[in-house]
Amino acid sequence: MLILRLCVMMFIQYVIWGSWYVTVTNYMTTTLGFTGTQAGAAFGTTAVASLLAPFIVGLVADRLVATERLMAGLYALGAVIMVVLTQATSFVAVYSLLLAFCLCYFPTIALTNAMTMRSVKNPGKAFPPIRMMGTLGWIAITAIVGFLKVEATTTPFLFAAAACVVMCLYSLLALPHMPPSGGGQKVTLRAALGLDALSMMKDRSYLVFVIASFLACIPLTFYYSFTNLYLNEVGVDNAAGKMSLGQVSEVVMMLAMPFVFRVFTVRGILLMGLGAWALRYVLLAYGDPGAGVWMFFLAIIMHGVCFDFFFVTGQLYTDQEAPAHLRNTAQGFITVVTYGFGMLVGSLLSGYALDYYTTTTGTAIVRNWSAFWLSSAAMSGAIGLLVLIFFQSRARITAKPPEAAAA
């Protein structure tokens, strides 16, 4: 059954990402002794790859090679890189290998999404539950990594390598054939980066949304980069496993979003999302593994509100505001702004901030985690004020008629 094969594809796809992403800065700082700035820079390879991935997809998958064959090649190369990464210890080697892996892996996110949408009759209805299997894959692998207590080892890289091998074979043997669909079309830098969507910036509210989306990725990266390290340092058992509760909440909130859209405007939902980010960081700042552990749990569980209310709503708002001929371009543009430039800046700043709030006495390293998280809370609050004051649109997320959705 095609739907089942696509669900399995999504599950393994996000096992690859989740196996190492949550714990990599913990490994780099705890085991390899990297500084926060170095760890943040290495974590930022995901953002660099997000900037370059559109070129790989646009130049190769759409014009030269069948999608499933390109995916198989990328997964195979990614598996080799991950195995080599287990032996790397210098910053230059780790950074280079992580960047090489991300350049292989991140194009496959767009490719698996595109394959799914091209394979089903009604993408609007079929894609969300298929994509949800990816979240379940992330939850499963992070729970395993946490249960085995291997966050600060190279084992997560081996998990990723093994999952890449599985996906390489699965792409060739089980996925539908997707021949190139854009042969002969001219590729431009403007189109690859989605810059045709700049015309949408004439709407002041959408311009404010784009700016806020870029800025929101900075505190977002603080969470992604260093929460696992923080929880392990303060003595939280099975930190990676507990962090997977964030993806569970994401699934729950995704199911609740249609109701939220009926009740609140886009402005209201964005403000609630940013408010949740600020509260989450306050909880992380004042929680502890003893009597205050409930603050850690609540901060993690709030991930569904934090992510879905701002970023998922933003993607839908972008799709709704874009002219029919610019919808794909607009999604590419907002992805480059957020997961590309925003996450890159956030990765660098989060690493710098960690070093700023770290002191070394002899061989002892002491980090002022409360100040680190409160700085993130302040950023989230400031972005919320930006949206509150300047985002004046009263737009709501509404269901499109079938002909609009297919445009």
Image (tube, rainbow, N blue to C red):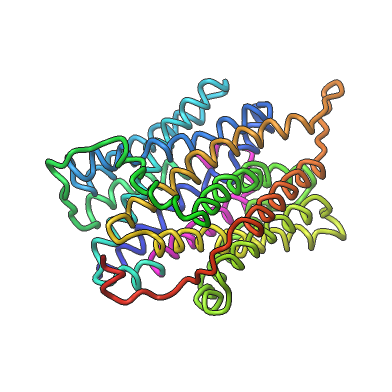
Q: Position of residue 219 (x, y in %)?
A: 65, 46
Q: Position of residue 32 (x, y in %)?
A: 64, 27
Magenta stretch, main secondary structure, is: helix
Left or right: where does residue 308 sit relative to residue 231? left
Q: Residue furthest left?
A: 184
> Which region shows up in magenta?
129-157
Compared to residue 188, the image places residue 329 above or below, namely below
- Answer whether residue 397 is visible to the viewer in this image: yes
Compared to residue 271, the image places residue 213 above or below, namely above
Comparing 344 with 331, the one in front is 331
Residue at left 82%, top 23%? 363
- Answer whether residue 245 is visible to the viewer in this image: no
Is residue 146 found inside the magenta-colored segment of the image? yes
Q: Quadrant of residue 360?
A: top right
Is residue 245 found inside the magenta-colored segment of the image? no
Left or right: where does residue 34 sit relative to residue 68? right
Q: Position of residue 271 (x, y in %)?
A: 64, 62
Residue at left 16%, top 50%? 181
Image quarter in which the N terminus is found: bottom left
Left or right: where does residue 146 sit relative to residue 62? right
Image quarter in which the C terminus is found: bottom left
Total of numbered circles in the picture?
Answer: 0
Left or right: where does residue 241 sit relative to residue 164? right
Q: Quadrant of residue 31?
A: top right
Q: Position of residue 276 (x, y in %)?
A: 68, 61
Residue at left 22%, top 53%? 173
